[in-house]
Amino acid sequence: MDEDYYKSIGFMCGLEIHQRLNTREKLFCSCTSKPIEDDEKPEASIIRYQRAVAGELGKIDAAAKIEEGKKKAYHYNIFKNNTCLVDIDEEPPHQMNKDALGIALSLAAAFQMHIFKELEPMRKEVVDGSNTSAFQRTTIVGLDGRIKVNGHDVLIPSMMLEEESAGIVSNGEDEAVFNTDRLGIPLVEIDTDPYIRSPSEAKDVASYIGMLLRITGKVQRGIGTIRQDVNVSIKGGARVEIKGFQDLGSMDKYIENEIERQKKLISLKEELAKVGWNPEFGKFEDITDLFASTSSHLVKASLENNGSVIAVKVKGFKGYLGKEINPDRRIGSEVSDYAKLAGVKGLIHGDEDLKSKYRFSDSEISSIYSRLDIKNNDSFIMVTAPKAKAEKALNYALERITYFAKGVPPETRSVYDDNLYTTRFMRPIAGGSRMYPETDAKPIIVTDEMVKEAELSKPNLENAIAELKEAINDETMIKNLLLSPRYQLYKEISSSINIDKKVIADILMQKFTEMKREGVDVDSISDDTLKSIFEMYKEGKLTKRGIVQMVKAAAEESPYAERSRLYRIAEERKFRKLSREELLQIIKEFEEKGSKNILASIMKEHNIDIEAEELKDLLNNSKV
Amino acid sequence: MYGGLVKELLDKKGLKIGDFAQIEFGNSKEIVKILPNSEFTEKDILVAKLENGYNFGIAVDEINNIEKVQYKEKSDDFTEPESPSIELGKNLPKVSIIYTGGTIGSKLDYRTGGVYMLLKPEELIANVPELSSIAMVHPIHLFSVASEDMTYLEWQQIARTVADEIKNGSRGVVITIGTDTMHYVASALSFMLKDLNAPVVLTGSQRSSDRGSSDAFMNLICSVRIAAESDIAEVGICMHKSSSDDYCQFIRGTKARKMNTSRRDAFRPINDLPIAHLGVKGEIYYDSDYNKIKNDKKEIDLADKFDEMVALLKVYPNSDPDIINYYKAKGYNGIIIEGTGLGHTPVSGKPEKSYLKNIKEAIDSGMIIGMTSQCLYGRVNSKVYTNLRLLSNAGVIYCEDMTPETAYVKLGWLLGNYSKSEAKKLLDKNIVGEIKDRTLYDEFLI
């Protein structure tokens, strides 16, 4: 589709990019910013409950309230090097990390922002448990920046320096578990204006900003270190924030689906208006008794766990809940997502095939209908769970159904299905009332020297391109490298190991992509191991093809292998590049065998441990 | 409040705190709300709030233009908290909640930056709805004094209010108070409230109640529960038992001490076990012996005088024993010494560093000198070492297993309410649980 189309539907789209900074310490304490290894065990765990408190303007934020409705126990895992009392809300914050501020300021300079003279740390209320203090410390650093993407000016209205949240380990009905290693790592939030013109442009803008971030050389890399959230709306719809993209490549497809979802919700609203539908519901009916001898596994399991079955009639809504609004997502899924806020697994509705999906008997079904007094056009929803929870779930669900008459609710949604590019409701969109000043942290004065330093250290795309041109001189590869999350790794390796930079770029880009496609987990290899492999190449112990084989072997066998281990692997698997003496010996053997095309014959057997050019040189020389 | 260039600018433009203004700087034009500055705000910096909720500080010389505008704040879709159905628990036991400062049961007013007390039961319950099922709460605002600024005058006021409330039919009393000197107040109330036959609970919070993670809510709920439901007839402190929101504990007022600057489980029993601990669901577990509420006890009485001419003195290596003479010359009636180890001061090293002569002279002049230990845990002893015997022979009273703070409060109270000779006799005798004959194995570092 072209831009005119998106214009015609009133497409609005902006990005919120969160990037973790690669500082030694966290933003407000001296814990390490390096997250734990995957298998690290916590040294302790604490339990906390949180409640919504009024924001600065005296209002409790809608998002905060809904989360509180769940009244969960939050467990926070504590790690020796990564957690101190600041992280678990037991000690006031220390001074803001100067390095983190420096990086944020240099980015603000790169975006040509207005940098404030005095920064005022704020608390942004967070009640999903992802912060032990129930708020995130966040500070606006600059305003009104801009970048040029595809010849189009994209404004960056604001940039914030803030704390990373705690990483969620598990999320159950009554409790959630978080790791606190991530909590408090410095993060920049970069927001664009909402005038991105198409889904594919959104992808380009995200790529461009990602590139600038990587050029600083001071951002963390790896899964989860950058998050790109998208805000989308169309005319007649509402702002919806989509979170949780792991891969920029499919961002446009999610946006397309969101457009579709909003269009469907708008036409549902119109249809409902046409038939004069008004949200009208029956009373909550406890119909547990109907299922005393049910063969529905779902209900049986719930009843065994102290569950009830509560149902409510939705007047005049027959046929709507089953309508598809996104691939494999129905109007009923929208309602069910809300019900889940109460901690239930989902809901059952009247448009579903109750017999085959839930194994209800005919008599059970007709009893439901008569108990709820379902007339021709009526539908119903029901939830099976402990009674109070089931009723809470139905209340949330009815709140959502009521909104169908109004159109698209403003929501934060998360990526739901990676293959179908669909999303699901997370919570109502956060409003402005969830901010209040962080009274434990002093304002920060930004001096002229700091601004000057930011100007000098700001990431410069032109310089980065020029530098790469000199080293690689391959435009496609340069472009790919700059857009790749591995750019920083390339910089690190190429600055510390003096070998042909083209080889490094080729391995990290082309070869890594190929290996990934073959199913090799190249990202599992530690930086040090990877550097050691390039060192071996530099020492003449590996050929270029040998590097690839070593990477594969390391990924399979030992992603954190040290040098000695790598040498051993090279020997065992015959990856070690042969010495000149060994080569001469082989040439001699092949000559004696009377091979015709010695070069081809040798290479056929030794394509990993011999570099063809070297062999050719040797053969040419030996003939002379 | 703003001064200098900011004030000049605001005055010129007719802008007040809380007004909306359109402000122009650099290439930007923003609608902002003018905010008050804080004590940390740099000179000539104006603090304002953007529409997205963020505050920022801008130097006056960066501002190209600023004009007052009429602006209506955005309100969110379903934000206004519906007023809760107030259930005052009329059939439940009456519990008085006395506010003396601190952030529990108070709300931050973001417009003024001030803290105001939730004095109407309805307001309090709206904020901590759990209370409505525990007690009929009766909030009283006594005063707002920071913990570190409290003196015995405030202790006396609190004691009188507690006595009045109990006389007026409260089953128990909760006192919300700043945490820094809470254990001094708890000791003082323990001595001042005579014939106490009700639970008196002091509580506070280490995280202010304007944050969702505050310990205030749980501390208040557990405290009210002790006051409404327990059969404990003692003064104690009720705060978090651990860093988790799983249990609070009730510690005897004379045996509690703040042992951490910031953690929510800062209050620990010293040389004692907690009296009880309480779970989040309201269950009370009794952990050790305590005075129980009796049916046929006489009415509460007050012994609330206090002699402020008592000092608490820490000795340390290289310290100057002249300090004793200083207090003597100022007319002090007593000193509690926080000695080293079992209860030492320097006595037999360099003569100019020895406390012995000065202590002896002070005692001979009529001062009471009590000895406690800066170890905090364990009991002082006057007999094990020669140097101890020297002090003891000079007339120093060894205060057994009392904390220095409790011994200090006790001595001031004794001198206020008894003759000097009686005070001297009573200092190392148990009155309200401040001294225990047995030190138990499991009381250390809990």
Image (cartoon, rainbow, N blue to C red):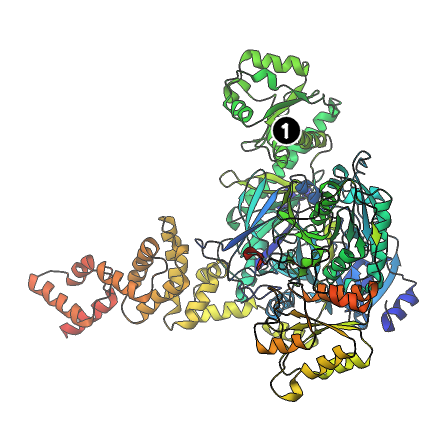
**Badge 1 amino acid:** Ala
Residue A411 appearing in the image: no
Q: Residue at x 37, y 63 (%)?
A: A530
Q: Is residue A69 visible?
A: yes
Chain of the residue where label 1 is placed in the rendered structure: A
Image quarter of the C terminus of chain A: bottom left
Secondary element at image label 1: helix
The quarter of the picture where residue B159 lies is bottom right
Q: Is the residue A153 above or below the residue A174 in the image?
A: below
- Residue count near mark 1 (Cα–Cα under 10 Å), binned few <14, some 14–19, many ≥20: many
What quarter of the picture does the N terminus of chain A occupy?
top right
A334 or A26, nearer to the observer: A26
Q: Residue at x 30, y 56 (%)?
A: A553
Q: Nearer the viewer, residue A363 or A408?
A: A363
Q: Is residue A457 rendered to the left or right of residue B190?
A: left
* Residue A201 relative to residue A158: left or right: left
Residue B247 position, x and y percent, is 63, 47
Nearer to us in this view, B139 or B227: B227
Which residue is depicted at the point 10% across and 64% down? A589
> From the viewer's perspective, is residue B192 above or below residue B386?
above
**Residue A229: horizontal and vertical position, in percent?**
60, 49
- Name the residue tied to disc 1: A390
Taking depth in this image into account, of B310 and A561 the one nearest to the observer is B310
**Left/right of residue A176 with respect to residue B199 in the rendered view:** left
| Count of number-bearing discs | 1
User: Residue B352 location, x and y as percent?
Assistant: 66, 88
Which residue sits at x=45%, y=71%?
A: A470
Task: Tell me where residue A570 appears, x and y as whole percent.
Answer: 25, 62
